[in-house]
Image: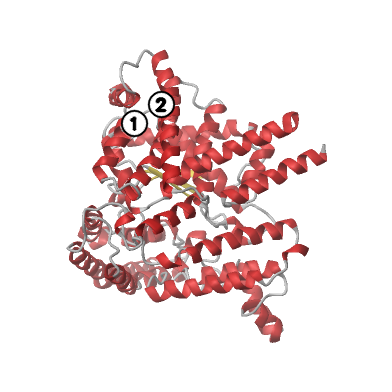
Amino acid sequence: MKKLLVALALIGAMVGGSWTYQLWWGKPWNIDNFYEVGFVKLLLADPETLTMLGIVDNTPVDFHSDELTDISPAAERAQLELVQEQLTTLGRYKMGNKTSQQQLSGQILRWFLQDIIAGSEFMFHDYPVEQLNGWPTALPTLFSSFHQLIDRSSAERYIARLAAIGQKVDQGIEGLALRAKKGVLPPRFVFDRVRNDLEKLVQAPVDESVFYTSLVEGLADLDTINDDDRRELEGNALSVIEQSVYPAYRKLIDYWIELREQATDDDGVWKLPDGDAYYAFLLRHHTSTQYSPEQIHQLGLSEVQRISAEMDEILRQLGQQNTSVGIAMSLIGEDPSFRYPTGDVGRERALAVAASAIEEAETVMPAAFSRLPNAKVEVRRVPKFQEQSRAGASYFPPALDGSRPGIFWLNLRAPDQDFTTFDLRTTVFHEAIPGHHFQLALAQEIENVPNFRRSLPFTAYAEGWGLYAEQLAWEYGLQNDPYDNLGRLQGEIWRAVRLVVDTGIHFKRWSRQQAIDYMVAQTGLPESTVVTEVERYIVMPGQACAYKVGMLKILELRERSRTALGDLFDIRDFHDVVLMNGSVPLEILETIVDNYIDSTREKS
């Protein structure tokens, strides 16, 4: 994209006229130019995403890394207008004379844009501030993990970004007020979780704030900055945090406390205006299927029953089964021999186990993949101030320019409670190798496709792959221990339960406690883990349904390919087909795999 931006500037300076006008403001003559320019236009309004992608920061076209993304209602409406404009322009191209990859790019982009427009009637139905991914707690991560510090200029942009937090808070409050006026408020417990995190943030002394320590640590090893400049920059940052950042967060806390008075304890989005229609849209958005809430609920019940039977058989072989699967797994999980030690000893051991599992997977997976990502993946601990609200593990892809590896975030708030020795490895295989790291890092390496193909998110594809990766690791001998296999199956039944619980909360009007009780009973997971998970489903409706739906589709397509091709089937080719087209909606993935089957037959 950096080359594209530079090219646009050069074109404007050297050529001018109608060609440049068409390229940026009209219909570019070449559809590949349209794909790239359209992607750039969407990113121009999102400086934070640009920094997370890591492709133009600290370059001659770094126009953004001293800014934060505008989250005002006006900015959200402007982004929708841009999406509608992009879809209209895409419709003006005749696709019949385009290459197969150009046509595929068009199909993916059209699905993406149409999905946004389909959801536009629910534009302000979401919860922009919540305990997991809300922007107030995401900002510290932007500064601590993604803003690159390489010289004085990048540090000055860091401080300018800090100064912009006040404006962002004002925009965020405007958006919250608009949603509240429409009757869109998260349940009351969310207010308490968020308030706790925000107060922890501002209770820290300014010189211990993550906003400050991240700058200090980033500057410490730079020989491009002398001691006097370093002290000046650190002093400027302290002043901005004390005079602008902390007051802005306190202003948000005060408004958040005020807003809580309007909240209720109803957990599902059925309570929102047109809540049932909103939830149906979210299921289509996240699963990229036409499944109804009832169909997904029934699918979940069926999968829970199937996986329970498989776990029951293993438990009987181990002599562990005298009761239900959930109770048996709970008892095993409480056995001290399957727990990590408390405190830092347990944290260090869990980090070491995760790193070791990644190394093992790196040696085994070449048998199943012809392409391995160039980027490495690192295990990092979730920042302490986010431990109480964030999920147990997550992944963030490497920077596109190679300056940052993939990051596997591990939440180590209570290692003796949140992980067992038989489930941590499965988590690693899902988030890192061969899971999200393979999926996202390889997508960045796809050649001769528009940039959006390397970074667009489709939940069912991405999370379906992550869950499929857990089974694949078992198939390739990484979970040979029967207890490890139980851990894998516990992870799978957990995702099947999600189908039941998510639809239960948002469609069948289950309470938060009803969902927690069902999940504990079926999975045997610790209640502390289940509470965090259920609270996630409440603030991210439909998202949790994508995992099992996506996995089942990938397995279905793998079996379809194996049956159709017989001796011609090669698992490495299948994985290439699934991964090396980037993230796609499931219905488009099905077409891609069918084309692979046909072309393989033709070649034989």
Q: Is residue 149 above or below residue 423?
A: below
Crowd around label 2: few <14 · some 14–19 · many ≥20 (10 Å) = many
State how many labels appear.
2
Q: Secondary structure at mark 1?
A: helix
Q: Name the image quarter holding residue 103.
A: bottom right
**Residue at x 45%, y 65% (from the top left corner):** 48
Q: Is residue 244 above or below residue 478?
A: below
Crowd around label 1: few <14 · some 14–19 · many ≥20 (10 Å) = many
Q: Would you name the residue on which mark 2 appears?
A: 308
Gap in Å between the C-alphas at discs 2 and 1? 8 Å
The reply to whether residue 433 is in sight is no
Where residue 149 sits in the image (x, y, percent)? 45, 62
Q: Amino acid at mark 2?
A: Ser
Which label was assigned to residue 91?
none
**Residue at x 57%, y 69% (from the top left corner):** 40
For marks 2 and 1 on the same chain, the one whose residue lies earlier in the sequence: 2
Instruction: Please indicate whether residue 256 sits to the left or right of residue 554 in the image.
Output: left
Q: Would you name the residue on which mark 1 appears?
A: 522
Instruction: Please indicate whether residue 312 sits to the left or right of residue 50 in the image.
Output: left
Instruction: Residue at the far bottom: name it.
Output: 17
Q: Amino acid at mark 1?
A: Gln
Where residue 473 sits in the image (x, y, percent)? 53, 31
Where residue 169 sits in the image (x, y, percent)? 31, 70
- In which quadrant will I find the N terminus? bottom right
Residue situated in front as seen by the camera: 583 or 20: 583
Instruction: Please indicate whether residue 590 sits to the left or right of residue 352 in the image.
Output: right
**Residue at x 42%, y 56% (from the top left corner):** 145
Where residue 231 sits in the image (x, y, percent)? 34, 67
Q: Secondary structure at mark 2?
A: helix
Q: Are marks 2 and 1 in contact (CB under 8 Å)?
A: yes
- In which quadrant will I find the C terminus? top right
